[in-house]
Image: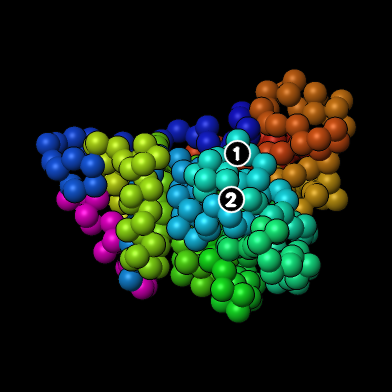
Amino acid sequence: MQFLSDNAASVHPQVWDAMRAADNSDSPYDGDAVSQALDERFSGLFEAEVAVLWVATGTAANCLALATMCQPHGGVMCHEAAHIEVDEGGAPGFYLHGAKLLTVAGEGAKLTPDGIRAAIDPIRDDVHQVQPHAISVTQASEYGRSYRPQELAAIGALAKERGLGFHVDGARFANAVAFLGCSPAEAMGPADALSFGCVKNGAMSAEAIVFRDDTAADLARYRRKRAGHLQSKGRFLAAQLLAMIEGDLWLQNAQQANAAAAEIASACGERLMHPVEANELFVTMSAAEREALRGQGFGFYDWGADAARFVTAWNTREDDATALAKAIAGL
């Protein structure tokens, strides 16, 4: 009964079907019919004209998007627990040719305009200090918290006021949309670019970078090639993305994962470290309690010395979620 990570979930059968259907001769790279359909299909999803690039990993999606906003001498404002800061092995510095991540504190791994201002305002406007060029937030955050549309609007207003790019890391974007019950456009807010996560949500090896500006998308295409991410048979990545958004599979999968997380959360009570607003749970428990759960067959990660993290996925079995809820209640 695995709750280690939604990265470990199986590939959805509809995604496999779409990849098999794409297994025909077509133009290489992103010139195939499936890749060429992405802009139109995602524009319908976001109710506005967008340009979409496929890549194989979330790290590449985040970094290629940010590379269109930040010069090598600049910086990206992000939460101190942000994935780009903590879990991407220095990739932002690599893709952005030395640009710096400027970290900000915030409850629930979320940024606020006041927190961003407090970090930006002391920076002198001269060549001796790294100047902020962009803001990056994670939807849902690294602690499973979802930004409300009005929160994104406020950060977007600050970005516009300061002339900064605005990026959303949407590794679990679908889970945030499912929790908020809003439209994808509202959950993206006024961001310039979104990393639209699919691998954690039923895809095999495809993520989408959604750009609101064609010029930025064109720049990212050159950077994608230079970075080694222009796959010769890109139709297989594009097919996964289309399969995810057709019939709202992406949203249905997230709703299933969120429902499993809510079932477990109902048994955690005051053990919950953060409100559950997506598919991650952070739960306080001793080493002995964690060992007891593992002895019952549950897989999960320790979160520091006195807590555990549980992640549900689109294919989490209802019986497994119920069993974990009962086991936690019985500790």
Residue 121 in magenta stretch: no
Question: Which of the pair 282/217 is nearer the observer?
Answer: 217
Question: Which of the pair 256/206 is nearer the observer?
Answer: 206
Q: Which residue is mark 1?
A: 90
Residue 34 in magenta stretch: yes
Q: Which residue is mark 2?
A: 99
Q: Residue furthest left?
A: 25
Quarter of the image for residue 297 reads top right
* Vertical comparison of 330 with 109: above or below: above
Per the picture, the main secondary structure of the magenta-coloured stretch is helix
Q: Residue 61, image x and y in percent?
A: 46, 48
- What residue sits 24% from the left and 36% below the top? 232
- What residue sits 70% from the left and 31% below the top? 301
Q: Residue 18, image x and y in percent?
A: 26, 42
Q: Nearer the viewer, mark 2 or mark 1?
A: 2
Q: Which residues are magenta?
A: 33-48
